[in-house]
Image (tube, rainbow, N blue to C red):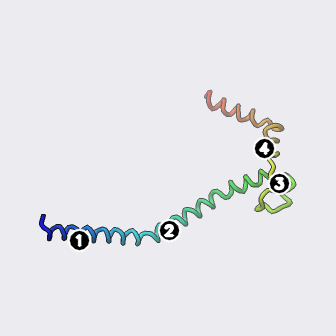
Amino acid sequence: MTSVSTELVSSKAVEAEKEAKARFWRRVPGYVVAYIVLGLGAVISLFPYFLALVTSLKAPDQVFSSSSWSLPNPLTFQNYIDVVVKYNFLSFIWHSLRSLCCT
């Protein structure tokens, strides 16, 4: 190739690269808005699960006396122990798994 054609090819490559960068930076605000919307949707979707977990870790007297938004103080797992021991929850799980596997 001659030096003129080499310069022409390299100048076209530089122009194409500049155009690609310009296209990218034009799209960035749209990407930012999309990720903000997706993040807010994730927080809104996951918040009820977080609230249920926080409530399950509170002592029974804290559930209705304090704000439902507050974190448990002290953190207690007694509710989970009661479900497993008093109400034989593992038996229910076992029967569900057995009927799932055997049918």
The residue that mark 1 highlights is 11
Classify mark 4: helix, strand or loop.
Answer: helix
Quadrant of image for the C terminus: top right
Of the image marks 2 and 4, the number of the one nearer the N terminus: 2
Foreground label between 1 and 2: 1
Looking at the image, which is closer to me, 3 or 91?
Answer: 3
Q: How many angstroms separate mark 1 from mark 4 (CA)?
A: 69 Å
Which residue is at the front of the view, 30 or 93?
A: 30
Q: Nearer the viewer, mark 1 or mark 4?
A: 1
Q: Is the residue 27 above or below the residue 75 in the image?
A: below
Q: Label 2 to label 4, Cα distance in Å?
A: 41 Å
**Mark 2 lies on residue:** 32
Spatial CA distance of label 1 from label 3 is: 68 Å
Residue at mark 4: 80
Image location (x, y in percent) of residue 6: 17, 67
Q: Residue at x 79, y 41 (%)?
A: 83
Identify which amino acid the numbered label 3 is placed on: Pro
Q: CA distance from mark 2 to mark 3?
A: 39 Å
Name the side, left or right, on which 70 lies relative to 48. Answer: right
Assess disc 4: are there few (<14), some (14-19) or many (≥20) residues with their C-alpha within 10 Å of its C-alpha. Answer: few
Mark 2 secondary-structure assignment: helix
On residue 74, the disc is 3
Comes first in the chain, label 1 or label 2: 1
Which amino acid type corresponds to the residue marked 1 in the rendered image? Ser
Instruction: Give the amino acid type for the residue marked by disc 2 in the picture.
Output: Val
Estimate the spatial distance between the alpha carbons at disc 1 and disc 2, rounded to whole Å.
Answer: 32 Å
